[in-house]
Image (cartoon, rainbow, N blue to C red):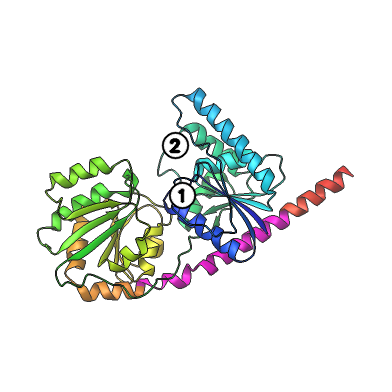
């Protein structure tokens, strides 16, 4: 099977991590995989198997006006089209909303099926109307549309008037027993994600500030990078917590940090299927999460394998911290049960779901080509 995978970049982030994981898994099973990004490869954060053909188009540009944006997108479509023609795939899989639209336009007339994947809850983060209209029109022509959760799929089906397949993210199994703090004093609350408004780190900092005085042995560590760094740093300083909250930046050793953590928190305002939460659960770490739009509720059964708090409820999150920080036995029980996600979301299980979809899509595409050839004859 020859596959082309399209994603904006490999520069960090959940969608990029999943795309790299799938590319490596398909390649290691003997498939010919081409991974295309709109960016250059200089900022790649995720390693690829040596057999994956990496095509970095370097066509990501900022646009200062609509005319320039149109020109840049025409350039991207042409570059994508050339790359797809060179790879001659059996199918194209695209991740992330606007890139999906570009991939669909690039493949027009190439007679190759394109599968588009939405990575978050549609409508949670507003986009320009032109992109909303384009996606609605183009997604109806896609060979398949994939969402990460049933709730996201239901919303897409209403908007598109077509069936949407649910395929969640894969997660690699945990690498061993959790290794929480051992000095008898310091405990770590860990969060992971881009420093952007969607991840709600401002809410997290405010919630931690409420309990920091009652739990002096706890510190908060936020792994990730983004444009909100300065604003978050000012918030931390305003609470007088510069020595209790660290933001060391992007880390390639996220799983190690999760194993060392005593508690993991997801503070997002909205999600698709949160990779960071899935990975923390697979490592056997007790997790607390906002019950935000899509995602966490499909992973966590409150009080069984994790802790859910109403979305954006800062006081509720602080109360959850109080409960979990003082109860090591509860954290251990939640962490043990959390590891069950390794069975439900294993790479082999999720890859099998993708392969089933690909087989169906390619069979339908072959039938359509045969029908067209017969009519032309």
- Residue 337, percent from left and from top: 35, 74
- Residue 17, percent from left and from top: 46, 55
Residue 362 among magenta residues: yes
Q: Which residue is mark 2?
A: 127
State which tag comes first along the sequence, 2 or 1: 1
Magenta: main secondary structure equals helix
> What crowding class fits label 1: few (fewer than 14 Cα within 10 Å), some (14-19), or many (20 or more)?
some
- Residue 286, percent from left and from top: 29, 68
Residue at 38% of width from left, 57% of height from top? Answer: 252
Q: Is residue 371 left or right of residue 342?
A: right
Q: Nearer the viewer, residue 348 or 50?
A: 50
Residue 294 among magenta residues: no
Q: Which residue is mark 1?
A: 44
Residue at 23% of width from left, 44% of height from top? Answer: 232
153 lies above or below 25: above
- Looking at the rendering, the stretch of residues picked out in magenta corresponds to 338-364
Q: Nearer the viewer, residue 137 or 218?
A: 218
**Most distant residue in the right direction:** 377
Residue at 46% of width from left, 24% of height from top? Answer: 65
């Amino acid at each position: 099977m020859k596959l082309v995978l399209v994603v904006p970049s490999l520069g960090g982030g959940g969608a990029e991590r999943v795309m790299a994981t799938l590319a490596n898994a398909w390649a290691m099973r003997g498939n010919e995989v081409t991974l295309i990004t709109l960016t250059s490869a200089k900022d790649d954060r995720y390693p690829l198997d040596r057999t994956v053909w990496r095509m970095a188009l370097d066509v990501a540009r900022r646009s200062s006006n609509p005319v320039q944006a149109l020109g840049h997108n025409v350039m991207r479509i042409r570059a994508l089209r050339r790359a797809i023609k060179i790879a001659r795939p059996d199918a194209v899989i695209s991740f992330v909303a606007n890139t999906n639209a570009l991939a669909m336009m690039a493949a027009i007339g190439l007679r190759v099926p394109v599968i588009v994947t939405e990575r978050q809850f549609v409508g949670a983060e507003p986009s320009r109307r032109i992109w909303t209209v384009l996606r609605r029109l183009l997604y109806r022509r896609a060979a398949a549309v994939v969402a990460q959760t049933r709730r996201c799929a239901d919303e897409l089906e209403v908007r598109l008037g077509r069936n949407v397949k649910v395929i969640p993210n894969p997660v690699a199994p945990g690498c061993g027993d959790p290794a929480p703090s051992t000095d008898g004093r310091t405990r770590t609350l860990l969060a992971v994600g881009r420093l952007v408004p969607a991840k709600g780190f401002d809410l997290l900092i405010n919630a931690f500030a409420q309990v920091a005085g009652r739990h002096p042995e706890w510190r908060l560590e936020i792994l990730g990078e983004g444009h909100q760094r300065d604003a978050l740093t000012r918030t931390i300083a305003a609470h007088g917590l510069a020595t209790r909250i660290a933001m060391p930046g992007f880390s390639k050793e996220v799983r190690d940090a999760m194993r060392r953590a005593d508690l993991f928190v997801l503070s997002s305002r909205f999600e698709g299927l949160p990779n960071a939460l899935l990975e923390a659960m697979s490592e056997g770490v007790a997790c607390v999460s906002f019950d935000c739009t899509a995602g966490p509720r499909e992973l966590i059964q409150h009080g069984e394998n994790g802790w859910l708090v109403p979305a954006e409820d800062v006081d509720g999150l602080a109360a959850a911290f109080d409960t979990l920080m003082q109860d090591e036995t509860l954290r251990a029980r939640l962490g043990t049960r959390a590891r069950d996600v390794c069975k439900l979301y294993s790479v082999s299980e999720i890859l099998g779901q993708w392969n089933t979809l690909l087989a169906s899509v390619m069979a339908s595409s072959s039938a359509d080509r045969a029908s067209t050839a017969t009519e032309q004859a």
